[in-house]
Image (cartoon, rainbow, N blue to C red):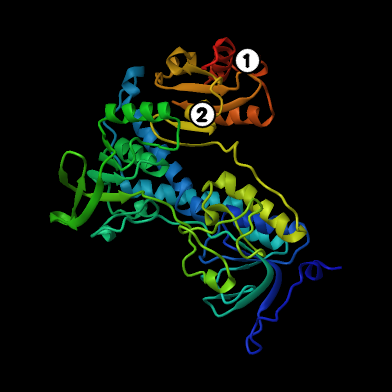
């Protein structure tokens, strides 16, 4: 039996006057989730088409998200290092930012990352058809129409459409910039307000502050980085305040934006004490990331949508069992590292009828702020709620030789284990190279290494990763919390 026969490919829902191209699997979106799904489905023998709305593959992360943000973080880091050079006997003048030059470098690096990925060539080599002919829209349960007029039908469809920034529903919201359009700012703003203190807002706050902007950070949440361990939030907040940023959390709301003199923007927001009106050169809204599910015609395919995402079961089936949603589209863990594994799992479930899941309890995530931060597994609060006898240890950066050498003593690594110290339940770091440190702990957690074994690992000296050994040894000595 062929793959097509096994999947029951049919063109019965295509109008006779406009026959649709027929495939076993159609993948909507050529970002990390879509690329992983398409390549895995083709590897399993399915006839696959990828439908990409833009003229660029790679998705949001490569083109307008985490890759350009990381290049900006590099520029910010260089500015910080230049300003501190005199402490090492290096005489330099005050650094001056060339914003157009920085933007050009970011875009050049984005092109470089996309070039090494070579998705179109990989698709061709795998026998996958790539259609970059505008937005795809469901006509019916199995048929999609592209803006070009082309129609595609498939037995299984995997939705990997990614997401976009959300603007607040307030007067003047159109005057704000969203994170993926920061590079379109004509000049570096002298004063900038960032609404939203999640991962994206915090990274942009560090970037603008380091490049010389006066930064005001606003959020309704009671603290920054609400998804992170509370102590991580506290350290990053203190660092931002020490760097001269204005940080306002727990505000009542943002009321409006309005045009002001000299192409500036008047921002009105309230807190428990008063209404505030301030004028900025730019306002960035980092206030949410809904999936790009609008105008997909999902109702025509019987696919349910909730809160701007497609709810799925453990195997990524939507309410229409032949349609899967992965990555940003399902609104779960909107991270590249999750999307790739979800894409592969959905492809296997689509082609083979398998029941593969991708549990995300070991999903490292963080941000390139100043200081960096990252975490994996349970936060301390979550761990204590599940196991009051859990064990917690904190190793400080100012006790780590490499951090002292580099004058980067702010930060810590927190390890959380069960009371028998057999399993590491969570790890959270803030400080230089925190993301890399947490990645190393994640590897140990994935391998099932217990605390005693981790404490015996020989770490190169002097390195930031050596703090893992310090924390593990502290964890062996620590008393249960209950």
The residue at the far top in this view is 477
Q: Position of residue 311 (x, y in %)?
A: 55, 57
Residue matched to label 1:
455
Residue 122 in view here: no
Tell me if mark 2 has few (under 14), some (14-19) or many (20+) residues whose alpha carbon lies within 10 angstroms of its own. few
Indicate which disc residue 385 carries.
2
The residue lying at 68 percent from left, 47 percent from top is 357
Disc 1, SS: helix
Q: Quick check: 174 left or right of 27? A: left
Quadrant position of the N terminus in the picture: bottom right
Mark 2 or mark 1: whose residue is earlier in sequence = 2
Residue 250 in view here: yes
The residue at the far left in this view is 261
Name which quarter of the figure residue 319 lies in: bottom right
Q: Position of residue 360 (x, y in %)?
A: 60, 41
Name which quarter of the figure residue 460 lies in: top right
The residue lying at 53 percent from left, 46 percent from top is 335
Q: Position of residue 385 (x, y in %)?
A: 51, 29
The residue lying at 66 percent from left, 53 percent from top is 315
Placement of 18 over or under 336, stated as above or below: below
Q: Quick check: 61 left or right of 124? A: left
């Amino acid at each position: 039996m062929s793959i097509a026969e096994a999947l029951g490919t049919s063109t019965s829902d295509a109008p006779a006057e406009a026959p649709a191209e027929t495939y076993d699997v159609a993948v909507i979106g050529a970002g990390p989730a879509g690329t992983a799904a398409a390549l895995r489905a083709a590897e399993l023998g399915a006839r696959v088409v990828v439908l990409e709305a833009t003229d660029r593959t790679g998705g949001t992360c490569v083109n307008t998200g985490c890759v350009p943000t990381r290049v900006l973080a590099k520029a910010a880091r260089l500015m910080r290092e230049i300003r501190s050079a005199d402490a090492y006997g290096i005489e330099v003048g005050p650094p001056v930012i060339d914003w157009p030059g920085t933007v050009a470098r970011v875009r050049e690096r984005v092109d470089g990352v996309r070039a090494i990925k070579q998705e179109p060539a990989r698709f061709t080599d795998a026998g996958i058809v790539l259609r970059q002919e505008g937005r795809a829209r469901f006509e019916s349960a199995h048929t999609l129409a592209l803006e070009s007029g082309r129609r595609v039908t498939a037995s299984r469809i995997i939705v990997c459409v990614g997401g976009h920034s959300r603007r607040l529903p307030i007067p003047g919201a159109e005057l704000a910039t969203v994170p993926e359009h920061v590079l379109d700012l004509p000049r570096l703003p002298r004063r900038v307000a960032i609404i939203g203190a999640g991962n994206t807002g915090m990274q942009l706050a560090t970037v603008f502050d380091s490049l010389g902007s006066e930064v005001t950070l606003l959020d309704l949440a009671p603290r920054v980085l609400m998804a992170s361990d509370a102590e991580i939030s506290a350290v990053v907040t203190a660092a931002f305040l020490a760097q001269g940023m204005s940080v306002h959390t727990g505000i009542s709301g943002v009321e409006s934006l309005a045009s002001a003199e000299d192409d500036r923007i008047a921002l009105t927001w309230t807190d428990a004490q008063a209404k505030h009106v301030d004028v900025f050169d730019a306002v960035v809204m980092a206030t949410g990331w809904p999936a790009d599910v609008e105008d997909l015609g999902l109702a025509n395919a019987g696919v349910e949508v909730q809160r701007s995402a497609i709810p799925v079961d453990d195997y990524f089936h939507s309410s229409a069992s032949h349609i899967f949603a992965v990555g940003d589209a399902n609104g779960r863990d909107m991270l590249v590292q999750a999307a790739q594994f979800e894409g592969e799992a959905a492809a296997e479930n689509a082609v083979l009828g398998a029941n593969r899941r991708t549990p995300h309890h070991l999903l490292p995530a963080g941000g390139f702020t100043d200081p960096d931060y990252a975490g994996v597994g349970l936060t301390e609060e979550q761990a204590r709620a599940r196991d009051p006898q859990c064990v917690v240890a904190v190793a400080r950066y100012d006790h780590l030789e490499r951090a002292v050498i580099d004058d980067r003593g702010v930060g810590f690594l927190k390890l959380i284990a069960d009371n028998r110290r057999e399993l590491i339940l969570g790890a959270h770091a803030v400080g230089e190279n925190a993301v890399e440190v947490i990645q190393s702990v994640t590897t140990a957690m994935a391998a099932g290494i217990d605390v005693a074994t981790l404490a015996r690992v020989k770490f190169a000296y002097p390195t930031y990763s050596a703090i893992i050994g310090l924390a593990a040894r502290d964890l062996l000595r620590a008393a249960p919390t209950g």
